[in-house]
Image: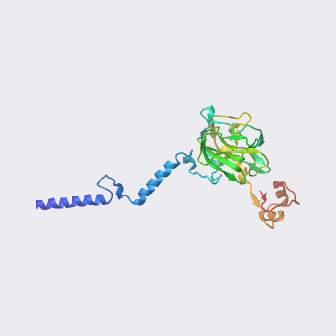
Amino acid sequence: MFKQKILIILFFFFKGVLFSQDIGGIAGEEFEENKPKEINELAAEYTETIDSLSWIPYFNEYSLWETHKIHPYKNDFTKLTDTISLILKYSECDFIHPICGEINSDFGYRRKRFHYGIDIDLERGDPVLASFEGVVRIAKYESTYGRVVVIRHNNGLETLYGHLHKIEVKIGDKVEAGQIIGLGGSTGRSTGNHLHYEMRYLGEPINPNDLIDFENGILLSDTLQLNAEHFVYLKEVRARKYYRVRSGDSLSRISYRYGVSISKLCKLNGISRNSIIRIGQSIRYN
């Protein structure tokens, strides 16, 4: 009887050991070879991805590293409830003015359209400098901006340098404040040599005048306290609606389509009843 009890105990003990090994090991142990292959591969891929993106500034906030689209982000900071503190510089060498020159066109409405940057006068071939240290996200030719460079900076901002004659950096390059990133020019949609300069945070345009004293080429403050007030102008900009003219369109047809008088269409667009509208032209209707 005693012998039978011993045999029964030994039987269940060894059965339990075998079962625990089947599901990954003896109580508390984890055997790598027993993990499904897919889990191992996913874990390795995740680790590799995190490691490969660790060099990208502010990746956790942006969650995107897009090297083809210049403006891939979709955010609305007009509804921002918090204040975001961005440290722009720790020392004097952390910011360098991109280029010294007169302002040809400021941030704001221009010919009834909003101009999201500042145009700085220059001569073709003048060196254009990175404002802050960071990593090049865009370096290519684009129909509107011409040869353009976009840099994501360690302080969270992105700066854009448009209409360059020549690009001196490539995507993924780490650049220092004051490093030459291109030579000035008039490529793309441009009527003369100048630098089109933009500053954005998570894709939302910021007026560079809120950060930089352009007359003296210095920062207004070492820290930017970013809040909804910086983006109030976007409410009006985004409320405006435009219609792109198609073949066979006329002012009367657009007027009827949107329930707006021809007189109002003319006033909104700075045209007359006798103006010829072209296919592809944008007509504001509200």
Quadrant of residue 129 within the rendered picture: top right
> Which image quadrant: the C terminus?
bottom right
Q: Is residue 73 above or below residue 131?
A: below
Name the foreground residue: 191 vs 73. 191
- The image shows residue 51 at horizontal and vertical percentages of 49, 48
- The image shows residue 223 at horizontal and vertical percentages of 62, 36
Q: Residue most toward the bottom? A: 248
Q: Residue most toward the left? A: 1
Name the foreground residue: 244 vs 124. 124
> Which image quadrant: the N terminus?
bottom left
- The image shows residue 120 at horizontal and vertical percentages of 75, 41
Q: Residue at 69% across / 52% down in the picture?
A: 141
Colour scheme: rainbow
Q: Is residue 29 left or right of residue 52?
A: left
Q: Residue at 31% across / 56% down in the picture?
A: 25
Q: Does the image show residue 270?
A: yes
- The image shows residue 233 at horizontal and vertical percentages of 71, 47
